[in-house]
Amino acid sequence: MDFITMIINGLSIGGTYAIIALGYTMVYGIAKMLNFAHGDIIMVGGYTIVLFFPISPVVGIIASVIFCVIVGIVVEKSAYKPLRGASPLAVLITAIGVSKLLQSAAQIFIGSESKGITVNLGEIKMGSVKISVLTLITILCSIAVMVALTLFVKYTKTGRAMIAVSEDRGAAQLMGINVNFIIMITFIIGSALAAVASVFLVFKIQDVGPIFGAMPGIKAFAAAVIGGIGSIPGAMVGGVVLGFIEAVCGMIPPITPYTDAIEFAILIIVLLVKPTGFLGKKRREKV
Amino acid sequence: MALLEVKNLDVHYGVIQAIKNISFEVNEGEIVTLIGANGAGKTTTMQSIMGLIHPSRGEIYYNGQKINNIPSHKIVKMGMTQVPEGRRIFSELTVYENLVMGAYTRKDKDGIEKDFKDIYALFPRLEERKNQIAGTLSGGEQQMLAMGRAIMSKPKLLMLDEPSMGLSPLLVDQVFEIIKHFHSLGTTILLVEQNANKSLAISDRAYVLKNGEIVRAGTGAELLANDEIKKDYLGG
């Protein structure tokens, strides 16, 4: 029954990566920037949960979403918005700076030692397979979030405006779309998604430190690139692919220590074979 | 009072001056054309009016209100829009969704529904293909969609940037027919064209733009009859 365990683990890890990757890919598609501080929003969410957990786990989750969104808005307004129209390199360096700023702030104000919580949601038995409740919740919540986001983008006015802005900012302005507002909405959604991912990660790892978000952040970035950065279904596919690779590596003891190396090697191979990622497209101009 | 008034406009790209002290106006109900060769500054002028690029000097008034520092999306709300050069439809959205985007600033559901009917009556091809991804349309269909999308915002002043570019002669005729149709419904038109023949024929007035300056102005008929214009822009 190892096979079923592997699929379930793959989906759970993949779902978490996919949700983080969606934040990268939407911000890239709409604001045309790589938000390297995205992973650190997860860290902010993680600490918030740990802080509010003693009151109630639900309060922790809600506080995490609220606080991540606030930090996301502040970062966008203070660091990225003034650079609208600046060279992509300046924006990239700023994003890396924001990432380091958040990590250092956590170190200074909370301390470099990690803070932990204890959660045990138990297990359920399905035939001969035992599955942790957390894994199941992670899978179901990830699917729900992805379906909701897809419907939002496809069927709401704001969602469609997001596609319009990502495709052609100038033409979108000619429709009367306020591009700055759409970018802000994108950061809000991305930060809320990071908060959701932080819930899954904190409950699983049960330990939060200043670089809590760095590794999941960079892995999810790889997932977004593998799927085709800028593409929403691409981020989902990339996340699940990476999750399965991790689950498979986890089941084969001799290669388990090399999991990260294998994941990034696959990123490189995908980029060599298909530089735009699985679902990324090259824009064709029609005359 | 003119609906649109451009006064002493200068536009620079870095150190290069693209527009040199141009002034012109468009009155309500007119069709006005800016003609000029490639690089004369026609698109730059249009983009400045829409707030997509910022002039270094001069004023732009719409309905008597200065709009220089108003962001583009608010200018659209005030009743002005543009069919951009190269159509720039949203290729990942369907034909229907592109038209919905055109009505982005509007809240009047009934009015929007009625305008959908009118657009589909005017462009039956768009109705046939309403659920098709817009990127798969032919060039002519994309131009129709771009015009339909712009009219969905119910503009008082519609600007069109090279709407006939890259189209077959038959489609070019159709595009000018549609412009006349929009005009007959009360929309004021500012047109930018290289196809001087066709655009001067439907224009009340026109301006000739050369190297970023307005070198001549007159009624459409006057300019069509002018020998110099004939030589430079009408192919003999």
Image (cartoon, coloured by chain):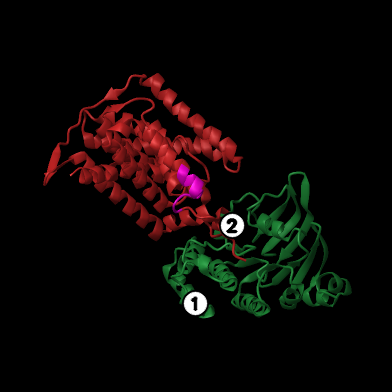
Residue type for callout 1: Tyr
Left/right placement of residue A155 relative to residue B162 reads left
Percent from the top left, x then y, of residue A176? Answer: 53, 58
User: Dot 2, how many residues are within 10 Å of its Cα: few (below 14), some (14-19), or many (20+)?
Assistant: many
Tell me: residue A108, above or below residue A156.
above
The chain letter corresponding to red is A
Residue A188: tell me if it is visible: no
The chain letter corresponding to green is B
Left/right placement of residue B122 relative to residue A54 reads right
CA separation in Å, label 2 and label 1: 26 Å
Per the image, the residue denoted by label 2 is B75
Percent from the top left, x then y, of residue B109? Answer: 42, 68
Percent from the top left, x then y, of residue A276? Answer: 50, 50
Q: Which of marks 2 and 1 is nearer the N terminus?
A: 2
Percent from the top left, x then y, of residue A23? Answer: 41, 44
Residue type for callout 2: Ile
Chain letter belonging to callout 2: B
Residue visible at 60% across and 43% down in the picture? A85
Q: What stretch is highlighted in magenta?
A: A269-279
Q: Which of B30 and A282 is in front in this view?
A: A282
Q: Nearer the viewer, residue B141 or A156?
A: B141
Per the image, the residue denoted by label 1 is B120
Chain letter belonging to callout 1: B
Query: Quadrant where the N terminus of chain A lies?
Result: top left
Please, what secondary structure does the residue beneath circle 1 have?
Answer: helix
Q: Nearer the viewer, residue B178 or A16?
A: A16
Residue A169 within the segment the image draws in magenta? no
Tell me: residue A79, above or below residue A170.
above
Residue A277 within the segment the image draws in magenta? yes
Please, what secondary structure does the residue beneath circle 2 have?
Answer: helix
Query: Quadrant where the C terminus of chain A lies?
Result: bottom right
Residue visible at 44% across and 46% down in the picture? A226
